[in-house]
Image (cartoon, helix red, strand yellow):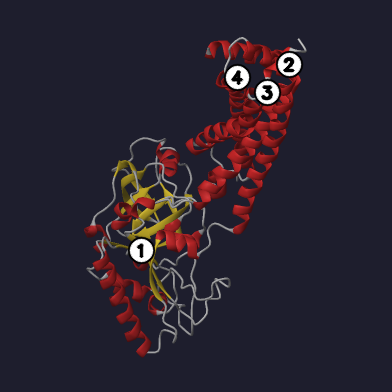
Amino acid sequence: MIGYYIRLALQSFRRHPGLTAVMVCAIALGIGVCIVTMTVYHAVSGNPIWWKNDRLYAVLINRTERDTFHPENPFLPLAQLPYRDALAFYASKIPERRVIMFQAGGVIVGGARAAKPLQIRTRYTNADFFSMFDVPFLYGGGWDARADAGPEPVIVIGRELNDELFGGLNSVGRRVLWSNREFRIIGVLDEWFPKPKFYDLSSGTYTTPEDAYVPFAWGPVLKQRPSLTYCFGPSDASSSKGFLNSDCVWIQMWLELPDASSRQRMQAMLDAYWTEQHSHGRFPKLRNVQLARVSEWLAENKIVQGDDRIMVVAAFAFLAVCLANTLGILLARFLTRAPNTGVRRALGATRRDVLAQHLIEVGAICVCGAALGLALGAGGLRALHGLYEIPGTRSGYQELMRFESVSIAWSVALAVGSALIAGLYPSWRAGHLPPAAYLKSQ
């Protein structure tokens, strides 16, 4: 019977090609707009490391009574620390893993394909960075604690930088000049782009990960200044030693605390440290020391804005308008075929048979609309991807506009929903028409 119903649907499409095309395009346009909106919203609202949400914590300590960097949330402490505070917390044995880090520029020379020195973004961090954040490797791996203590001249590079320097070949063991020093490559990252960049929002919410990673201690050794620094109160930060001893904040710190006991002990340590430093006149009267989960940190920084939610509501409202027009066309179309339906009912077709016939016709329209909507959604995301494209660089916002499996999932879900919403009532109405009234007219 399904094959028979499909043939009836195709005959109906041939009789009314214009109306069929209008319904398919209306559904496709609504689904396409929703795909673009939901794909972007999913990218900006997700927790990129949700499976470790109850284990990873950012260390936050307020520096002033009111935070001028977050006027909408003036009591939100910065997720950056001065050098001496970071070292004090890093010495704790309570966390299972701990990471201190900052971002700075750098110049790298080497590789068979790099004719000129390349300006790159470098993250100074420690060995736990890669295991804490589940960073994937294409070749090799990260360094160990001994390389942190040295510091040893080892470097991990990103996949794109490896493509540019070595044409994508396994470069582990090769040597490059970084900051005028020879470093040995020990690992190459695989494709990795957390969205948003939760581990360091100060360098940009949707910026791409850094090009290279070196042991944290190279920062003080090379007297390297971070890309972003905030200083509070009078301090002599002109010299390298003065900068390290100042209250300038520039280090991001994350801890991996596997259970409630470790979290309580770490919070107690932070509170005790704050009290001690406050007695020396360092911290303000209002104490605000936090261990913030990834989800809490993203929420406090308002990563998802109200405008993003409004766009989602507007997209679904547009889809609802498209479906309302489709519903009206289908209802008029099915009612004009009421005499044929009456004859089928008189010959023994049940209401369920009539309902199934019309739902298959609606389903075929929605499938075509979903396929076209998928193409429109892909085209829309590609257009936005090109709009945010910056020649020679990889833009973070550009990477949000990617056609992924979530886009296909939304297309399928919206197609099924559209078929039910747009076709159920007209099909039900057609199945409940009284056949006797139409048989008299035949």
User: How many numbered discs sit on the rendered protein?
Assistant: 4
Mark toward the viewer: 3 or 4: 3
Residue type (three-letter) at the residue carrying disc 3: Leu
**CB of mark 2 within 8 Å of CB of mark 1?**
no
Residue type (three-letter) at the residue carrying disc 4: Val
* Residue corresponding to mark 1: 57
Which class describes the residues within 10 Å of circle 4: few (<14), some (14-19), or many (20+)? many
Q: How far apart are marks 1 and 3 (CA)?
A: 63 Å
* Residue corresponding to mark 4: 354
Q: Which of marks 4 and 2 is nearer the N terminus?
A: 4
Mark toward the viewer: 2 or 1: 2
Which class describes the residues within 10 Å of circle 3: few (<14), some (14-19), or many (20+)? some
* Residue corresponding to mark 3: 433
Q: Earlier in the sequence, mark 3 or mark 2?
A: 3
Q: Where is residue 204 in the image (x, y as percent from the top left)?
A: 52, 58
Q: Position of residue 225 (x, y in %)?
A: 44, 67
Element type where label 1 sits in the image: strand
Disc marking residue 438: 2
Q: Distance between the residues labelled 4 and 2?
A: 15 Å
